[in-house]
Image (spheres, rainbow, N blue to C red):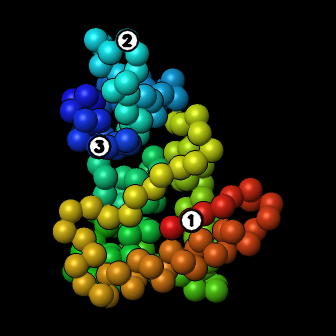
Amino acid sequence: MAYLLKKAGLTNILLQRVHYSVKKYLSQNKMLEFMWRQTWDHSGSTDIFTHLMPFYSYDIPHTCGPDPKICCQFDFKRLPGSRVKCPWRVAPQAITEKNVDERARTLLDQYRKKSQLYRSNVLLVPLGDDFRYDTPKEWDDQMNNYQKLFDYMNRQSGWNVQVRK
């Protein structure tokens, strides 16, 4: 597979659907990012950089960190009044000046926990999944709330974080 993807012109790939025991092993050994090499390629000419997502799914509740109940609170499509709800029964909150500190700390805690599974100091946190961002409202809700969180996090010099979109 790596050979075909490299020959198709890809230089990096992201994988989600891998058996949980493999994810567990790679997570424990901080090997979720690796150069995928075909067993017959001794020179490395077909190596492709591979990022493996560590958790169950690639939707927002399963990408910010290890606790989907917390991560779901940062899926702003699920704000109160939406027909889409968090199955853990804790709804997201729109980000305001009053709650930005607590919400940013909560989200950053999940990011930090997820970052412990990788060797790099760069963390990939996708926001979305199938059939998402199909309305301007969802785009605006996600963008505006995350922008407030990211701006706040980046202003906290003692947090040692640089969040980018």
State which tag comes first along the sequence, 2 or 3: 3
Mark in front: 2 vs 1 = 2
* Element class at badge 3: loop
Vertical placement of residue 42 versus 112, above or below? above
Residue that numbered label 3 is attached to: 9
Dot 1 falls on a residue whose secondary structure is loop
Instruction: Give the vertical position of 95 relative to 103 (above or below).
Output: below
Q: Amino acid at mark 3?
A: Gly
Instruction: Identify the residue at image location x=23%, y=41%.
Output: 8
Whether 158 is drawn above or below 21: the answer is below
In the rendered structure, which amino acid carries the disc numbered 1?
Arg
The CA span between labels 1 and 3 is: 26 Å
Q: In the image, is residue 83 above or below residue 75?
A: below
Residue in view at x 22 percent, y 79 percent: 134
Decide which of 111, 39 is in the foreground and name it: 39
Mark 3 residue crowding within 10 angstroms, few (<14) / some (14–19) / many (20+):
few
Quarter of the view holding residue 119: top right
| Residue type marked 2 | His
Looking at the picture, tell me which residue is in the foreground, 14 or 74. Answer: 14
The residue to which callout 1 is attached is 164
The percent position of residue 23, horizontal first and vertical second, equals: 36, 30
Select label 1 or label 3 by which is in front. 3
Q: Is residue 52 left or right of residue 130?
A: right
Q: Is residue 137 visible?
A: yes
3D distance between C-alphas at marks 2 and 3: 20 Å
The residue that mark 2 highlights is 42
Residue 19 appears in view: no
How far from the left and from the top, in percent, is residue 69?
40, 58
How far apart in space, not on screen, are marks 2 and 1 (Cα)?
Answer: 37 Å
